[in-house]
Each structure stands twice: as C-alpha cells, then as structure tokens.
Image: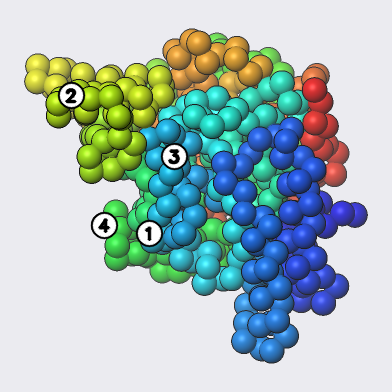
Amino acid sequence: MDIIDFTVHELQEKLKNKELTSYDITKAYADRILEKEKDVQAFVTDISQQALSKAKEIDNKKASGEITNSLAGIPIGIKDNICTKGVKTTCSSKMLENFIAPYNATVMEKINEENLINLGKLNMDEFAMGGSTEYSYFKKTKNPWNLNKVPGGSSGGSAAAVSAGLVPWALGTDTGGSIRQPASFCGIVGLKPTYGLVSRYGVVAFASSLDQVGPITKDVTDCAMLLNIIAGHDQKDTTSADIEKKDYTKALKNDVKGLKIGIPKEYFGEGINSEVKASLQDAIKRYESLGAVVEECSLNIADYALATYYIIACAEASSNLGRFDGIRYGYRTSNYTDLKSLYRNSRSEGFGEEVKRRIILGTYVLSSGYYDAYYKKAQKVRTLVMKEFAKCFEKYDVLLTPTSPTVAFDIGSKSSNPLEMYLSDICTVSVNIAGLPAISIPCGVDKQNMPIGMQLIGSRFSEETILNAAYAFEQDYKFREKYKPEFKK
C-alpha cells in the first residue's frame, strides 16, 4: 500500500510506531504532486518542496523530545481564502493575485500549533463564488475520477487534492455547500460545522453570516480529528461560540440502533437524478438494517431556501467586497484619469464575471426601494427556515438528503448558465441559512463510476451525532475499499 493511500489516522499510527518519518510522508506527497498536479490542477501555490525541509526539522525535534504531539509532521492542504502568513492568499482572483498575508487565520494558528505541514494553497472559485471551480482566475481544477468533469466548488481544489492523493486532508470553506458538494463529486468526506464552532478570523469573507471553515478528508475518523484541531472559541471572532471543547473522535461508536432519521420528501422530488435517488434509497435501507428508525418527513422550506440564500449571500458579498477598490486593498488599474475611473476600472479588471454578477445582485437587493422587498423579506424567511428545522429536530436526531441533485457534470456544461449552476446548491443552502452542521459522505457511484454523496444534517452543535451516523454507514458500506479515482481523460 502506498503512503498516499493511508488515512491520516493510519499515518499517525505509523509515525507513532516509527514505521514512517514525517519526511517519508511529505516526500511521498511532494512526489505525487509532481506526478499528478499537471492533470488535476488543484494548487494555486505549491510549496511542497519547501515542506520537505520543514518535515526534516520536525523529525529532528521529535527525536530530541522537543515536539511530542502525535499529528506533528502530517501534511495538509489549505483553501486559498484562508490567510497564511508569508504565503500567497489569492482567493483565486486577479484582485488578490499578489497578496501575501501578513498574519495567520486562527485555523492556521491551530494547524501550526499541531505542527502540521502546509503543502500549499488550493484552487477555488473566485472569492468562493461558484459550484464548479471553473470561476478561478488561474486555472480550472479537474475531477480525479474523470478529468473531463468538474470537482465541484467552491472548495474544488481542496476536494480534488484529497481525492487525488495530493494531500492527506485539507481545509475548505462552506457558504452554501462549498465543502459538501465538492466532497460529494470527488467521493470523499466533507463537514460543514455549526456556524460559530470554527473561527472565521483570517478567512477572506464572502457572506459573513453563512461562511464556515471545515474539514475535507478521506474518511470520517480523519474528519473528526481535523475538527478537533480547528474547533474552539476565538476572541478575535465575535460570532465564535463559547462552548466546551470536545473530542469528536470519541463520538465514533459505530452504533446507530434507535437513531431517528428523518427523510425530507422535498429533497427527493423533481430534479434529483434517478441514480442519485436510487443510491440514497439503498443507503436508507442500510441504516434500517443497522437498527436506525427511518421515517419520511416534510421540510416545507425547500422551495424558498435557494432564493433566500442568494439574496442574503449576494447582499453580504456586495458589502464585504466593497473594500477591494484599487486604493485600500487589491489590484489597482493603470488605466484611469480620475478617482471614479480608478474605482470602476480596478473593480472591472480585478473581479471575474461571476463575482461581478453577485455584487450587482447584492447591491440591487440592498438599494433604496428594494431593501424591504428583497433583503428584509429574505431575512424573515431565514427565521422560518430555522424554525422549520428546529421543529424537525424535536422528532429526529438526523435528517438524510442527497448532497447534490446530480453527480459531477462536464467542465463547461453549466458555466455559461448561472441559473442552472445555482440550482446545484438546492440540497445544501438551507443548512447554511439555519447555521446547522452537515456532513457529506460517499454512498455509491453511478453507471459512469462517478461518486454519489449523501448528506446528514444535525441540529446546532450536534456534530457528534452526525459524525457517528456517518461513521456507522462508512464502516458498513466500505466505499474506499470498493472504488477509487480513475483519472480518466
């Protein structure tokens, strides 16, 4: 078995038993990047060669007893909207093409405290706006299962890198499904934590009330381990929840007897691919055989969630991206005659089409005369979405839905039709609106051997419940033993 095929918890064990060194592991990933990055195009900034000297340093410090933590020396990949001191943080945009962060995001501080080794910054849709990683200024990332397909987005670089074995695990961000949908498309595990569980300090904002950092991993155990590292209260983030620190790996008991699972019928209706639906039905039967109590239920918010999400997200994006004006932050045009043309040309040249589209929509719904009709109404619907979920969780422990209505689609097939691209988020956005945790795990493949993802949604701060539910399914189904990316061209 190759080093890159091991999960992080397996690598941790091999480090502990001195079967491998940090240098061995980092070298295996650096070599893999040299071999496969040209096909996958997952990295914006590759620092894997610099990582090798860091690995040697960690091995020496472990030998002398200076470093004792068990994950020290494990490599990781970081989505390119998370500030990393001394390394470019571009958000895959011309606007921040040469920005080198002067400080670390809180999640990066936590990664560094564990002595994990950053292999580089991973590609994404520009400013996290998109569902396919086709809206990056730098490159289009490919899906390792089929290089003609998208990896999903906006954390497509992170998901593709984990799936292709370019990194053992990665950090992504999720505003409306941007961890879960690419995890589904790439046949891996992606967790969107409860809003406030993980600090957003140092994460370049798209929509501040929706954004959340989370793990993208090979399996559920790795997911729980990475959540252990990044979760926790942060005084620098006013939306950070001050709750007791937990060890999420202790929740993985592989027992779902008596677990009440609700199946919202609205998520299995028109628009859901028949093969996706069939895989989910098989997964439901599997849960029943494991002793879970499964019932159909109704979640009457599906029709409104997508419109509500795009109004709120675009409004917040319009506000957050106002700082990139050619003077305070970001790219500055050389083509201007006065202050007005400096603003206009810097933003016109620095932002891509999708970002401009969302800024325009957000500015419109916040403008005088339309604020009450759109933005204020969307915030009222948001409250209804939260209440509807709360009502469901009075009866059920977990809700089970598809992660995406389809498997990964062809590169270029939806990028010219924004509305069709937005509809890909139909199963995920309501979770962000309500601030809930949700995990996507693979539950099958279609006839073309493309992965299908299942989403498990929990009530606020019930990560332990959904991680255990995902773990029980994973241990029974054994997806990683049956299927792996084929790098088809």
Q: Nearer the viewer, mark 3 or mark 4?
A: 3
- Quarter of the figure with the N terminus: bottom right
Query: Mark 1 or 2 closer to N-term?
Result: 1
The answer to whether residue 386 of the structure is visible from this angle is no
Query: Mark 1 or 4 closer to N-term?
Result: 1
- The mark found on residue 97 in the picture is 3
Amino acid type, callout 4: Thr
Q: Nearer the viewer, residue 303 or 7?
A: 7
For disc 2, the neighbor class at 10 Å (few under 14, some 14 to 19, many from 20) is: few
SS of the residue at dot 1? loop
- How many marks can you see? 4
Q: Spatial distance from mark 2 to mark 3, Cα to Cα? A: 24 Å
Q: Nearer the viewer, mark 2 or mark 4?
A: 2
For label 2, the residue is 337
Q: Which of 353 and 325 is in front in this view?
A: 325
Query: Mark 2 or 3 closer to N-term?
Result: 3
For label 4, the residue is 238
Q: Nearer the viewer, mark 2 or mark 3?
A: 2
Amino acid type, callout 3: Glu
Residue lying at 62% horizontally and 87% vertically, measured from the top left: 66
| Rendering coords of residue 354 (x, y %) | 41, 21
SS of the residue at dot 4? loop
Q: Spatial distance from mark 1 to mark 4, Cα to Cα? A: 21 Å
For label 1, the residue is 102
Q: Spatial distance from mark 3 to mark 4, Cα to Cα? A: 29 Å
Amino acid type, callout 1: Pro
438 to 349, vertically: above or below:
below
Residue lying at 60% horizontally and 38% vertically, measured from the top left: 157
Q: Is residue 21 left or right of residue 340?
A: right
